[in-house]
Image: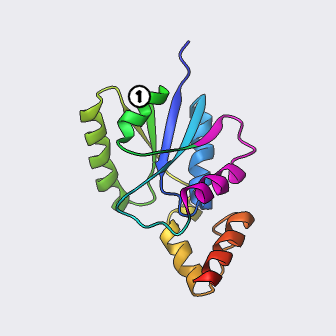
Amino acid sequence: MTRKIAIYPGSFDPITYGHIDIIKRASLLFDEVIVAVARNLGKTPLFSEEERVGMIEEAIRELPSVRVDSFNGLLVDYARSIGAQAVIRGLRAVSDFEYEFQMALVNRKLDEHMITVFLMPHEKYSYLNSSIVKELARFNGEVSCFVPPHVEKQLLEKMRKK
C-alpha cells in the first residue's frame, strides 16, 4: 500500500496558528505531511531558513506524522524527489482562491499526477497571515493570540534588533 504523502509549502515567516491549523487538518488526511520551507528569491524573509525550520519543528513536535524540510526550485520537482502525491494549500478567503487555483493548474501542467488539496483554516484564523503578524510586532502590537509562545519570543527579539 502506498503511503499518502503531502507537502505544505510556504515561507512561514513566521509560522502562525493559522498555518498550524492547516497542518493539523492535513495530518488527518495523509500518512505524512511535510511542511516545506520555500527559499523564495522574490521575498526577503525576516527569519533565516534555519530559524523558520526550527520554529516550525517546535510548533509541530506533537504531530508524529509531520516533518519539516526546505527546498529550492520548482515545487513539483521537490514533490517528485520525496514521493509526494499532493500539495496542501490553505484558503483563508475568496481572494486567495484565484492565485492558488492558477498555481494548482500550473503544477498540474508540470506534473499531471500532482494533486492540490485546498484546506480552509478555522474561521478564527481566516484573516491571519505572517505579514500581519510581523506588522503588529513591528509596532509593539499583541501577537500572542496569533503565534505560539516560542515564535512570539523570537519575533519580539528580532524586532528589538531592528
Q: Is residue 19 left or right of residue 74?
A: right
* Residue located at (30% from left, 38% from top): 107
Which quarter of the figure has residue 98?
Answer: bottom left
* Residue located at (61% from left, 52% from top): 53
Q: Amino acid at mark 1?
A: Arg
Residue situated furthest top in the rendering: 1
Q: Residues within 10 Å of mark 1 (few under 14, many from 20)?
A: few
State whether residue 86 is above or below residue 124: above
Secondary element type, mark 1? helix
* Relative image position of residue 141 (x, y in whole percent): 62, 84
Q: Is residue 140 left or right of residue 118?
A: right
* Residue located at (51% from left, 74% from top): 132
Which quarter of the figure has residue 26?
Answer: top right
Magenta span covers which residues? 48-68
Reading the image, the residue beneath label 1 is 80
Which quarter of the figure has residue 157?
Answer: bottom right
* Relative image position of residue 2 (x, y in whole percent): 53, 16
* Relative image position of residue 84 (x, y in whole percent): 47, 29
Q: Is residue 55 on the magenta stretch? A: yes
Instruction: Please say whether residue 116 is visible from this viewpoint.
Output: yes
For the N terminus, the quadrant is: top right
